[in-house]
Amino acid sequence: MSPRTEPAVRLEVHTREPFAEGHRFGDTGAYEVLTATARYAVDPDDPRVPAHRAVPDLDLAPRDDTGLVRFSGDVEILRPVGGGRRRLFFDWGNRGDKRALQYFCDAPHTNRPRTLADAGNGYLLRRGHTVVFGAWQGDLLPGDGRLLLNPPVARRNGRPVRGLATAEFIVEEPTDSLPLSRWSSTRSSPVSERGVHSARLTRRRYAHSAPEQLPPGTWRFARTQGGGPDLKGRSTALVPSRHDLHLDGGFRPGWIYELVYEAEDPLVLGLGLVAVRDLVSHLRHDPASPIGPVEHAYGWGRSQTGRAIRDFVHHGFNEDLEGRRVFDGLLPHVSGAGRLGVERFTNLTVPGGQQYEDHLSPADAFPFAYAESVDHLTGARDAIMKRASDPKVLHTQTSTEYWQRRGSLVHTTTDGRDLGFPPNVRGYLWSSSQHVADPAAGAPAKGVCNHPENVVATSALFRAVLDALDAWVSEGVEPPPSAVPTVADGTLVTMETWSRQFPAVPSALRPHGPNELYPVDRSTVPPVADRSRAYTVLVPAVDADGNETAGVRAPMVAVPLATYTGWNTRAPGQGHGALHEFSGSTFPFAATEDERLVTGDPRPSIQKRHPDAAHYATRIRAAAEDLVKRRLLLAEDIERAVSLAARWSSPRHRVDLP
């Protein structure tokens, strides 16, 4: 068959089985689970596909006798047996994990959803969506039920491709061996034979600290093996490994270690974006698709996969081989101003750059905004959204993205002026909430931070956002207006202004600023930031309680029992004082006026705000009803919000009052 007429993807369905033992989800009815393998065929020379130019090393991918590049990936589908509403909902699995049911349905996380409990409150299924989980990340290793993509290894004339790579290591507990990828779930780019002898390992206290080089004799490419019972007792061994790093005496918490080495055998990771394009297009348009007719396709991704969505759109992958739109609507969540980046030797599991961790990650590169803007440092002009094939987008982010992920740049110019969104985009700040908000969260813990983590519940907002997107696409009903802080109304401010606004909360170790962003020279390894110039990163303004004034206030924020922030600072011995990953904080109000006076807390006590728990619950209900009127919450979630508020929102809060 000619390469130009062969289908871009063939879907091999392996199993079909009833989901939730045939339980009927409202008017939609029963669902079934399909497991499949997608087999992809890409013609790198196809002139119809300019997006292929955004796939680094595609020209070095091995081809078959017909000139095609072939690879495969896992697919799992939750399909309404009766056809549903002809809506395809694609879950861009975060690091190979299935997350849509967890966040949209308040279900427990599982990579093998089969039972009624796995459906949670059933929102996606009651709405009649066909939920598709498709592998896109090509550097994951098997395990824990992750979805796997198998892209080819780049080769040059049959020989290994080599080049300098970096790997950063930060530990919370001492350990002596780590994979070069830093993540046990992720394939490491192996060190070359020459690289074993030329590699350099340094460590530094903070991201901008001067690095100190560790003597070569104190570390090696190896891993510790053993320590458990074996045939002759308990023993350990140090095993040479091209995929692991061993440090004598162990990696110490509170240090950032960085390895620079010659790696080889890079994967062609950009094919993951091709896989999403071709799979969704096949499911929408191919009569042989196993899910039946599809009228509209939506996609959702959070954090890493929110960045993947923005890259997908920016590089033109939302247009298939026949010139058709792939997704009608997309929901990137907590991506901040980042994109994915699939350059040679990229580690896709590594998060976007933070103040302490992975600070110079390539995830943050111009353009940051959906609307067209000019990079005031380089003069470049670009936008995320710039094609007729672009989808409608509802971009959601939390306070954490403004502090750690340069989130203000999504809707400002690079020098800090209001820019806003193009007509097919809306943006929403989920005020005073943190990057990860587990719907089943319990009492907050500190971990390696100074403060208990943020406890704001936001999962209900996902449901309202998807309903709004569906109405916008299928009925032309405009979604709620964007709700983000702006410079014009004084709700998006500099660190200096924020510092004057934030109250003197007892025991709070404030950040010294948000995660900054500088132009980075990536022609060197490791890359070098030019700290003499900077992009302007702004943060949301706060009220007298320290809670954010702009955005969408979840009921728990509208009627607070604490100050909730999108930032948390690292504890002593763990990079003290720097922002910690994507963690927020909860600073409880004093329970009584007496406690407030003893602690010197300037914020009114809970006793002053509410005569009893019933009053608190009544106000929570009113806050939820207001969000429903604004179409930012579904009516069905009013009672859930009130139920969550029972006993002062225990166990998220601990309040010893009537």
Image (cartoon, rainbow, N blue to C red):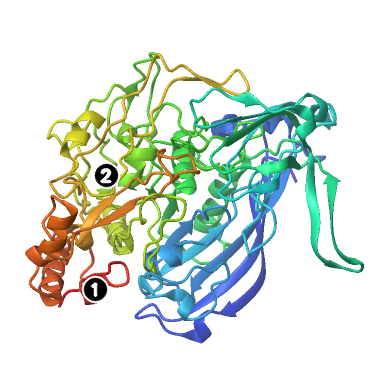
Question: Gap between marks 2 and 1, in whole Å?
Answer: 24 Å
Residue 524 percent location from the top left of the image: 61, 18
Residue 53 percent location from the top left of the image: 58, 29
User: Looking at the rendered structure, which numbered label has been put on residue 636?
Assistant: 1
Give the amino acid type for the residue marked by disc 1 in the picture.
Answer: Glu
Say if 221 sits above or below 449 in the image.
above
**Residue for badge 2:** 426
Residue at the spot x=45%, y=62% of the render? 100
Say if 202 sits above or below 63 in the image.
above
Looking at the image, residue 224 sits to the left or right of residue 537; the answer is right
Q: Quadrant of the C terminus?
A: bottom left
Which of the 4 image quadrants contains residue 134?
bottom right
Residue 237 percent location from the top left of the image: 85, 52
User: 126 or 67, which lies in front?
Assistant: 126
Give the amino acid type for the residue marked by disc 2 in the picture.
Answer: Arg
Of the image marks 2 and 1, the number of the one nearer the N terminus: 2
User: 72 or 557, which lies in front?
Assistant: 557
Residue 537 percent location from the top left of the image: 31, 29
Label 2 crowd (10 A; few <14 / some 14-19 / many >=20): many
Looking at the image, residue 558 sits to the left or right of residue 227; the answer is left
Residue at the spot x=51%, y=25% of the render? 209
Q: Secondary structure at mark 1?
A: loop
Tell me if residue 327 can be seen.
Answer: yes
Residue at the spot x=62%, y=58% of the render? 147
User: Looking at the rendered structure, which numbered label has been put on residue 483?
Assistant: none
Looking at the image, residue 610 sits to the left or right of residue 586; the answer is left
Tell me if residue 155 can be seen.
Answer: no
User: 508 or 642, which lies in front?
Assistant: 508
Q: Secondary structure at mark 2?
A: strand
User: 376 or 3, which lies in front?
Assistant: 376
- What is the residue that sits farthest to the right in this orientation? 232
Say if 172 sits above or below 220 in the image.
below
